[in-house]
Amino acid sequence: MEPDEQSGLMRAFEVANVINENAHTRTLLFKGRLESARPGQFVMAWLPEVGERPFSIAASVPLAITVSSVGTVSAALHQLKPGERAWVRGPLGTGFRLTGSKHLLVGGGYGAAPLAFLAKEALKQGGQARVCLGAKTETELLMQQRLYDMGCEVRVATEDGSEDTRGLVTQLVEQAISDEPPDCLYACGPTGMLLALAELCKRHQIPAQLSFEALIRCGVGLCGSCELPEAVCNQVGLPAGWLVCHDGPVAFLS
Amino acid sequence: MEELLRTNFLGIVLKNPLVVASGVLGTSASLMERAAREGAGAVTSKSVGPQPREGHANPVCLAWGNSVINAIGLTNPGCQQELPILLETKHRLKALGVPLFVSIFASKAEEFGEVAKVVAQAEPGLIEVNISCPNVASEFGEPFSASASSAAAVTRSVRAAVNLPISIKLAPNVPNLSQIARAVVAEGANAITAINTVPAMLIDARAGRPVLKNKTGGLSGPAIKPVALRSVWELAQAICVPIIGTGGVTCGLDAAEMIMAGASLVGVGSAVVNGGPAIFAKIAQELAEFMQSEGYQNLSQMRGKAL
């Protein structure tokens, strides 16, 4: 019997197309669907004989994952050509939940990967989606054009000033909030950025949904590898022992 | 509910008989505290050995229906690094009235004693001796649980090293389970934990390959419940020390069945995959409701009923 999305088993997906996002990031578009996937959820992608790594879901119908080449598995995924296959288990974890109608999306580095999927859902619901993207330098920016083409207002900050505002994405967020407070902020990126955003949202009394990254091994809430450090939990008001793969990756702060 | 489920195990009082099985949520003080707060009666830490181990590469674990197959590969920081974690965990669990059990492993019989000596400094309520991990055969060779003599040698080593209660964790895939259990009890084991995961594998037909990086792994969850029940039932008739019955318990009825097979405590592991850490309170509630509906006033009245 073919395994289904809820089985937890690997399912083979044929690559339909590969999109170059930036110098070291590609989006793999597959032929199959992952009907039940929500923005912010993730899959474990497996290449036999190579390994398995978590990737956020970039689109569900058809399935797409955005892969930055940072290790063996992601480098091997980058080599895939249309017609070749990767294996995927999932969707896993807890995704974003669109709240209200004025949405502010924030991506740091390759943390921008799931934001186009989220923006698409937000716009489909008739909401407004503003996006703040940050990266070290212009060549590391992700999803900027795609989000703009979808009709989102996109603001960009680079740490070296190579594109738009020089500085951190948090400065853009501060500005965006003062322009018009959103109903909810959704963010994905490095922990430092998420902590700064948590603080900022608390100050402005804006609900925040933050997607954390971690070393994920079992992916099903069993092995403990992806536990968010207790200090981080304390800082953002999450219960200690919070598991990124099971409780998250998206944390809901109010 | 408290009266129904409270139980005495080797002189320790537990608020309920549900134990977090080793390998599940047992990696840090904060996670073990969470399991205790979520309703576990006792918490077992993840197996710790003499040296740090990274464990196997991914894929290390897959859900298979409601069951789970894993080959994590005994990932642990080594007993010296683990000790401060255990001390902190003991401190936090004590405040909640939940005992800490510590699982240990090693590759040689004498090393088990050395690891036991280190973890004993945290004064756990029980040291569980994992001689039956099915996922490290390529490095460790045949598990100590495969024969009465090797299982007894490990027990002797640990018994000589510590005065704390010890439980030996046995594998079901042997033809002489009772004989092995009698041998470890004769060497001073205070309890038996049964069973470990069952050696298994998954092959992906389209990949034409085993899915786990380690190729084989250990099966747990509902798929092995009948195997666990049979093992506990056999052991309960062969030995007179308490049994921690573990394997496939995901609801109150499963826990009742395990106790009726003769278990004193009930290990819960893979149920966390579908139920999250909140599963412990849920199983405890369901067990209490079952006992009420069937007229059991305490666990002793139910224990061994199916023997």
Image (cartoon, coloured by chain):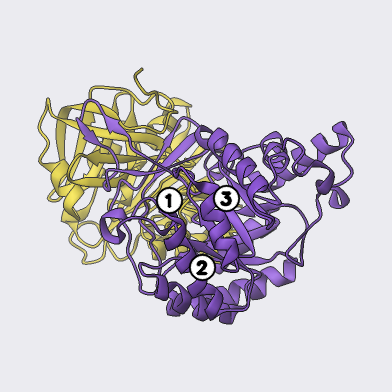
Chain colours: A yellow, B purple
Between the C-alphas of marks 2 and 3, the distance is 55 Å
Regarding mark 1 in the picture, which secondary structure is present there?
strand
Q: Chain of mark 1?
A: A
Q: Nearer the viewer, mark 2 or mark 3?
A: 2
Name the disc covering residue B84, or none. Answer: none
User: Is residue A240 something one can see in this rendering?
Assistant: no
- Check the image and name the residue furthest to the top: A1
> Residue A190 placed where, x, y %?
36, 60
Residue indicated by mark 1: A187
Q: Chain of mark 3?
A: A
User: Callout 3: 10 Å neighbours few (<14), some, many (20+)?
Assistant: some
The reply to the same-chain question for discs 3 and 1 is yes
Task: Choose the circle earlier in sequence order: 3 or 1.
Answer: 1
Q: Nearer the viewer, mark 1 or mark 2?
A: 2
At label 3, which amino acid type do we have? Pro
Residue indicated by mark 2: B155
At label 1, which amino acid type do we have? Ala
Image position of A84 (left or right of A98): left
User: Callout 2: 10 Å neighbours few (<14), some, many (20+)?
Assistant: many
Measuring 33% from the left and 51% from the top, which residue is drawn there? A111
Between residues A130 and B113, which one lies in front from this camera angle?
Answer: B113
Vertical relation: A60 (above or below) B5: above
Residue indicated by mark 3: A207
Between residues B253 and B131, which one lies in front from this camera angle?
Answer: B131
Between the C-alphas of marks 3 and 1, the distance is 11 Å
Q: Are marks 3 and 1 in contact (CB under 8 Å)?
A: no
Image position of B292 (left or right of B8): right
Between the C-alphas of marks 1 and 2, the distance is 52 Å
Residue A241 image-quadrant placement: bottom right
> Residue A188 placed where, x, y %?
39, 51
Between residues A162 and B91, which one lies in front from this camera angle?
Answer: B91
> Residue A203 placed where, x, y %?
58, 63
